[in-house]
Image: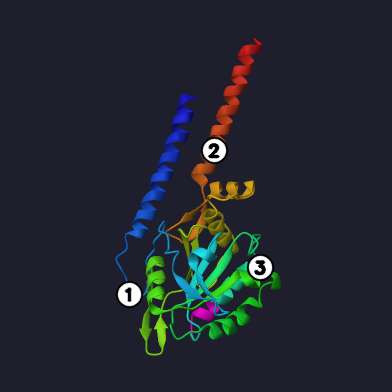
Amino acid sequence: MKKLFALVFLASIIGSLSAQEMVKSDLLKPDIEIGIVEHLGDTIPMNLWFLNENSDTVTLGELINKPTILLFVYFDCPNLCSPLMDGVADFVGKIDLKLGTDYQIITISFNTKDTPEKARIKKVNFVQKISKENQKDWLYLTGIQDNINTITNAAGFKYKAQGLDFAHASAIVVLSPKGKITRYLYGLTFLPFDVKMAIIEAQKGIARPTINRILEYCFAYNPGSKTYTIQITRIIGTITLLIALTVFISLLLKRRNK
């Protein structure tokens, strides 16, 4: 019995150390000119102000009070930005978390030439792909250069002007209700399960359904593959521990009955 418990403990330690090393190797990347430099665990500046699509001045602190999916685009982008927003609109209808209740979406333009009027037009093009009741919870913001620089630097989003356009990466950043960066998901399309898990992780500190806690326990983000993978070591360790506990209790009851 002691050997069994020792093996379970050793397996959990090895799994934990492996995950930590993967995270460290992923974060120790040299600085880059175009792309994403992950700032996991950092908190974005919540006092930054922007204009929403209705030309109202808003701060990030006023807006962010629940898990938030943040994406950076510019509205005249000929390449990645529209497919990225399409990918975001696509998963909204596929995850069983409710936009507006469980999370929200904030799109920030990193082009100072983009105006609230442009934001309003762009928003109409994409929010019509989601349910009408949730459209107010996908916000489109524009701002001045200083604030754009501050938020993109805080998120590790690196872009570069190329003529009238910009070279940039395609990703979404997931924030906690207090503005902490909890996850990056890359690409133009996203697996609904990956998005759901990222939102569940970002919900820490607020009430979560039991099923979400179980999912969080069984699955973990893999920095190597940039996806969520099942925690085999953790699950096997838990099952083994439960079996060992059951056997121990059975033996204890048998002794008492003798």
Q: Would you identify the image quadrant in which residue 112 lies?
A: bottom left
Q: Amino acid at mark 1?
A: Glu
Assess disc 2: are there few (<14), some (14-19) or many (≥20) residues with their C-alpha within 10 Å of its C-alpha. some
The residue that appears at 53% across and 82% down in the rendered structure is 116
Q: Amino acid at mark 2?
A: Thr
Q: Residue furthest front?
A: 57
Which quadrant is the C terminus positioned in? top right
Q: Is residue 23 above or below residue 2?
A: below
Mark number, residue 93 = 3
Q: Residue furthest bottom?
A: 163
Mark number, residue 173 = none
Q: Residue furthest top?
A: 258
Q: Is residue 121 left or right of residue 185?
A: right
Assess disc 1: are there few (<14), some (14-19) or many (≥20) residues with their C-alpha within 10 Å of its C-alpha. few
Mark number, residue 33 = 1
Query: Between disc 3 and disc 1, whose residue precedes?
Result: 1
Q: Is residue 54 above or below residue 17?
A: below
Dots 2, 1 in contact, CB < 8 A: no
Dots 2, 3 in contact, CB < 8 A: no
Q: Would you identify the image quadrant in which residue 15 lies?
A: top left
